[in-house]
Amino acid sequence: MLDAVENLDDYLRRYGRDLAGNIVERAEPLYTPGDEWDPRLYGMGKRPYQAQGDAIMAVSRLLGEAESALVVGEMGCGKTLIGLSIPYVHGSAERPNRTLVMCPGHLVNKWVREATETIPDAEGYIIDGLGDVLDLDPSSHPDRPEYLVVSKERAKLGYAWEPAVIERRDGYCCPRCAELVVDRDGIPVDYAYLDRNRRFCGECAAPLWQADNSRVRRYPIADYVKQHLRGYFDFFIADEVHELKGGDTAQGNAFGALASACGKTVALTGTLLGGYADDIFYVLYRLDPTKMQEEGLGYGEVGKWMGRYGVLERVTKYTGADNVFSRGRKSGTRIKRKPGISPGVFSRHLMDRAVFLDLEDIADDLPSLSEEAEGIRMSDELEAAYRELEDDLTEAMRAALTQGDKSLLGTYVNALLSYPDRPFGYEPLVHPHTGDLIAKPRELPQDEAFPKEERLLELIRGSLDDDRGVFAYCQYTGKRDVTERLHGLLLDEGIRSEVLTASVKPADRESWLSDRTDAGVRVVIGNPRLVQTGLDLYEFPTLVFYQTGYSIYSLRQASRRSWRIGQDRDVQVHYLYYRPTMQERAMQLMGKKLEASLAVEGKFSEQGLLAMTQGEDMTTALARALVDGLEGEGVEDMWSRMSGREQDDAPPSYADGLLFYVDPVNAEKRVRKRRHRSGVSSDEQLSLFGE
């Protein structure tokens, strides 16, 4: 019966309807889309779209049985409205809920504004410091819906600390028991030892540190809520929860503290996974520690999680070892985490607690979205300079790798990615350990625009002629900054533009953009990380990734800043890269890694499931392409193949370039198409690929 089945897509085409039917028969959903809504949803200041209301009702039903839920919604699908509405619907007129919201700093005002405009009779407050929570009465109950909003920075920040010891002639001693403080070897410690980490006395366990009253005096709001306001908030909403994934970061700990102190927790994100299985370990643990413990996973046992759901590489090195009477060998083994994740994460940890939304689920009348990856040929002079640099680096890389030296990977890959966009002012490249000169990039004249710059100017001129604002994304905004050069080129063309920099505080970026557009600025240049969460770029329906960056979080978030509810113009997203260069190879690899993230969110395809288990990290793959000259499928060919243009009978699937969504139970449901662009890496690769 399976003889004619050649791959997963073929299997799903043949048996997808039967599989879906079995699921419908055996699984009883808490809420079925299209079921009756709570009447209060119809009286809100902003009435939800059908899919939004269904998501609100589904999560509300879930929280009747569970303590936490996860809403994974594509950028622009209204996660703020959904998050605000869940506590409102879950409460009652006699006992309205009090909700604490933690979000990025630049979204605090937006959350308060949305709460008062959306939820009837609601009150919204900003928690700006400890004084705003000291006066809260733990025994009080609200008579109307309340939303208190705190930035994740305010929630985490506490006081500075300094060592608290008594100095004696023979060393430092504990202020409580006067015992001399020594290290593991029994040697008296110096002050620097105590200043590096908070330590406790080995004799009486007293803390050997104290608050530094000479510096900023504050107390972490998250800690105060956990210790003094436990149960005061009925709901806790954690916005952009993917930014809180760290196991021992201050923001991650603040998320965990607040989740444990509040009644119900709702986590919101648009990009759940960044390519590695441990990206969601601590998020899931803080949402439901009991479930993780039932699976035998302790809080810090991320290694066990990776062994079960991730991709690990075991590397063993053998070296010869001589002694007086014999010869043997020594071995050393280390384990590396690699990109990839088991599909079991979806079925065991996400299916019963997460709601997934796409923009097309929200509104069928959204303007169109078109995305185009465009490879650009270098000029003869630029190509000659690039090939010279590539040859020098290839030789150096091969020599280093034969010696087992991987310290050059990030530096040299980064050089080949950045040099074509700024082939001037580039310092000589030297070996980080020996200081030997490896390559000296050629200095090219700056008096003329390079091909990618010319294409950017052409796109901007065309958009402005059509009365469309443009936001140009640049990854390199530090040491190898390209934004000022682009700004200068636009001024030479008589085009008024502005550069958004990190010096603009997150809370001020919305007003900064509004002021610039009101003043007539139609072109803004900036790093995608500065606008990747929360900001609406309605005035910029043309987005150009002059440099893509290599974080899946940043790329997916930034590429949807314009295409969202409320946009009334068609949105165009352009991705520019030089070919044939390392930039093209990076685009290839990002496309393959994106599907692993999308598969975890329920968008399955054969390529996506394969990508979930492949463990090739970006740096190593790029270096292999550099050293070995591996040539894979071209970027345009890859997107052409994925979009189904090469075979008309391709099965419905989410691929690197085009999403086909079809309900296998209802074969008559129309196929919806939306172009996507890919880009993936973990945040740990940002240091290798961006300034």
Image (spheres, rainbow, N blue to C red):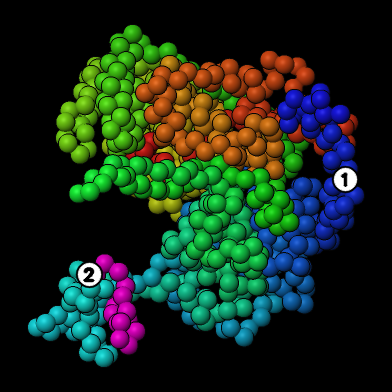
Does the magenta stretch mainly form a helix, a strand or a loop? Answer: loop
Provide the residue span drawn in magenta: 195-213
Q: Secondary structure at mark 1?
A: helix
Image disc number at residue 633: none
Q: Amino acid at mark 1?
A: Asn
The earlier-in-sequence mark between 2 and 1 is 1
- The mark total stands at 2
Q: Amino acid at mark 2?
A: Tyr
- Tell me which residue sits at (31%, 35%) in the image: 404
Residue under pointer 1: 22
Q: Would you say residue 485 is visible in this rendering?
A: no
Q: Secondary structure at mark 2?
A: helix
Does residue 159 lie above or below 75 as drawn?
A: below
Q: Position of residue 89 (x, y in %)?
A: 76, 64
Q: Would you say residue 72 is visible in this rendering?
A: yes
- Tell me which residue sits at (51%, 32%) in the image: 590
- Tell me which residue sits at (49%, 66%) in the image: 254
In this view, the residue farthest toward the top is 380
Residue under pointer 2: 193
Q: Position of residue 33 (x, y in %)?
A: 83, 49
Does residue 83 lie above or below 204 as drawn?
A: above
